[in-house]
Image (tube, rainbow, N blue to C red):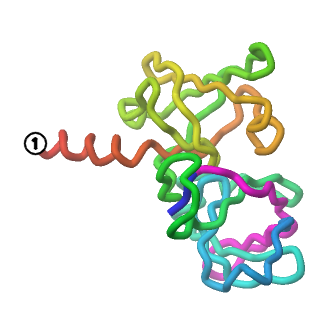
Amino acid sequence: MFTGIVTDVGRVRRVEETERDRRYEVETAWDVSGVDLGASISHAGCCLTVVEKGQGWFAVEVSNETLSKTTLGDWAEGDRVNLERAARLGDEMGGHVVSGHVDGVGTVVSVTPEGGSHRLTFEAPAPLHRMIAPKGSITIDGVSLTVNEVDGTRFGVNLIPHTWDHTTLGGLKPGDRVNLEIDMLARYLARWQETA
């Protein structure tokens, strides 16, 4: 489990096609001596397992299923990636409960400066858009955010300067694709309504 609070922006240093899937090596500012092999790390909102590590980097393997359902298939050497280590019991819950299971891929519609902040509008895929609610939580590329408004399949969020400067979201532009994870409670409520 994660909280949606990004603690490092890593960089893809190598992309390798393997016999099975795809392997990425990611550079990080973390002290990787404290990262165990088999550890779960959120990469742009997608939970992946560490399979190898070295000084200032670690490697993960990504299945074809994950590549087809997230933006990870678009990654190239040099791309920046929001990173978060798995939460531990007793950690501060700064964001909201995030599973690291991407629900769908959204598209940036607009990026508008607003005072010192930025307002971003996204298009969510159907039927995922029905589970996004004003003042509810959403995870965008691994970042926990509050939904400001919803209009059909579109929703808006506001990014404060810290989030803009310390995550990859500050580099988004219209047309970019992002990983979306809706609030876990909304997911279960929607499933309950389907079976009720």
> Residue 4: horizontal and vertical position, in percent?
59, 50
> Residue 65: horizontal and vertical position, in percent?
51, 64
Left or right: residue 138 compared with residue 117: left
Left or right: residue 60 compared with residue 155: right
On the rendered image, what quadrant is the C terminus found in? top left
Q: Nearer the viewer, residue 143 or 61?
A: 143
Q: Would residue 8 be counted in the magenta stretch?
A: yes
What element does badge 1 sit on? loop
Vertically, is 19 above or below 125? below
Count of marks overlaid on the render: 1
Q: Nearer the viewer, residue 173 or 144?
A: 144
Left or right: residue 50 compared with residue 16: left
- The quarter of the picture where residue 75 lies is bottom right
> Residue 102: horizontal and vertical position, in percent?
51, 52
For mark 1, what is the residue? 196
Vertically, is 32 above or below 106? below
Vertically, is 94 above or below 148? below
Q: Would residue 5 be counted in the magenta stretch?
A: yes
Left or right: residue 20 compared with residue 81: left
- The quarter of the picture where residue 66 lies is bottom right
Q: Residue at x 64, y 50 (%)?
A: 5
Q: Residue at x 87, y 66 (%)?
A: 13
Q: Which residues are magenta?
A: 4-26
> Residue 33: horizontal and vertical position, in percent?
79, 83
**Predominant SS along the magenta part:** strand
Query: Which amino acid is tagged 1?
Result: Ala
